[in-house]
Amino acid sequence: MGIIKNNKREESVKIICLTPVKNEKWILQKFLQSASLWADHIIIVDQMSDDGSREIAKKFLKVDLVDNYSLVFNELDRQKILIAEARKIPGKKIFIALDADEILSGNFAENFDWKEIKNLAEGTSIYFKFVNLLPSKGKYWEGPSEMPWGFVDDGSDHNGLIIHSNRLPLSAKGTSFKMDNTVVLHYQFADWKRMESKHRWYQCWEHINDPKKSSIAIYRQYHHMHSIEEDDLKSIPREWFLEYEKNKIYLENFEGKESYHWDYEVINYLKYHGPEYFSRLDIWGKDWQKLTNNIENNGAINLSPKQNIFDKLVLFYLQKTQRYYSEKNILILLIDKMFKIFLK
């Protein structure tokens, strides 16, 4: 039966969390604990995790665990799997698309904006502020804009990209709703070494799949966190965590490791394409030779690139100027453009 509200029959609405996973043991338990407080269903599409993520997901009653057997990275494909699985659930549905390192702020329970989403019309995109947390400092900085992490499903087709894709359909109706107080807490930077590992992999993937993209553009895109000034940081409000702490969910104490699954994928890239192919990328802070010898005991494999003086100069320039980089810094933009000409 429907719910009676304002003398009208309101259809029961399901809130469904859509999350792709590959080796997210470091945070998945806390993510699922927190999502279980607000989601009616949690769809996990797992891409062959081997770190215990699957076993964690199976412990939660609200989780539907779906396999993704693809050997390649493709955000659009996994999003379509998630959406198709969610649409098997009958009734009116609201999709909330979060990665495992993204958690809704715990003040959702008391916020008017969260309570209002069940009254939104089908086809409405729901925009959240996206905040990057530095728990070790008790600080955060805001992303550049609100993002459409929610959608009141109307059956629209989902058209996205292989990488950095919109996660949900955008309806032809084009209506939107902005959340004022409930935000998405991004924990990528809570484990700095993990973030660096992921960004090294991103750089390699970009260079392989978009070889016309300059190494300078790739560097700037995946080192944006080094442009954050102290003045950009704000104190993390305690209200974001109170609801979780009442339920004994503590979103802190993330321990880093020496290596991550992205490191081994980068090693495979280096072996297949050769280290020189990636010589202009900022991935050489990791000792690939040592890591591959540790796992294979094969010192005959040489994963060190032959970088010329110009490549080293450009990389040195990028590292020294990133903290000052912005789209408004005309001088750095001009120098970047000059270097791009010589790198062709």
Image (cartoon, helix red, strand yellow):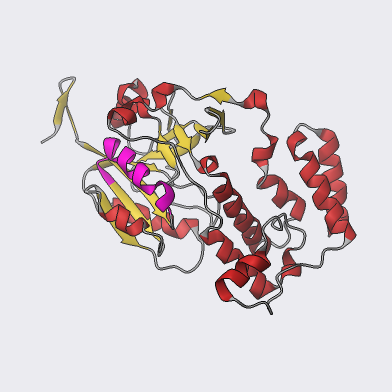
Q: Which residues are magenta?
A: 24-41
Residue 100 covered by magenta stretch: no
Residue located at (86% from left, 50% from top)? 339
Q: Residue furthest left?
A: 1
Magenta part, dominant SS: helix
Does residue 157 appear in this view? no
Q: Does 272 appear above or below 129?
A: below
| Front position in the image: 231 or 332 | 231
Q: Where residue 19 sits: x, y (%)?
A: 38, 49
Residue 34 covered by magenta stretch: yes
Does residue 227 appear in this view? yes
Residue located at (35% from left, 25% from top)? 242
Residue 35: image quadrant is: top left
Give the quarter of the figure containing the N terminus.
top left
Residue located at (30% from left, 47% from top)? 42
Residue 173: image quadrant is: top left
| Front position in the image: 286 or 145 | 286
| Front position in the image: 288 or 154 | 288
**155 horizontally vs 336: left or right:** left
Q: Where residue 153 sits: x, y (%)?
A: 33, 43
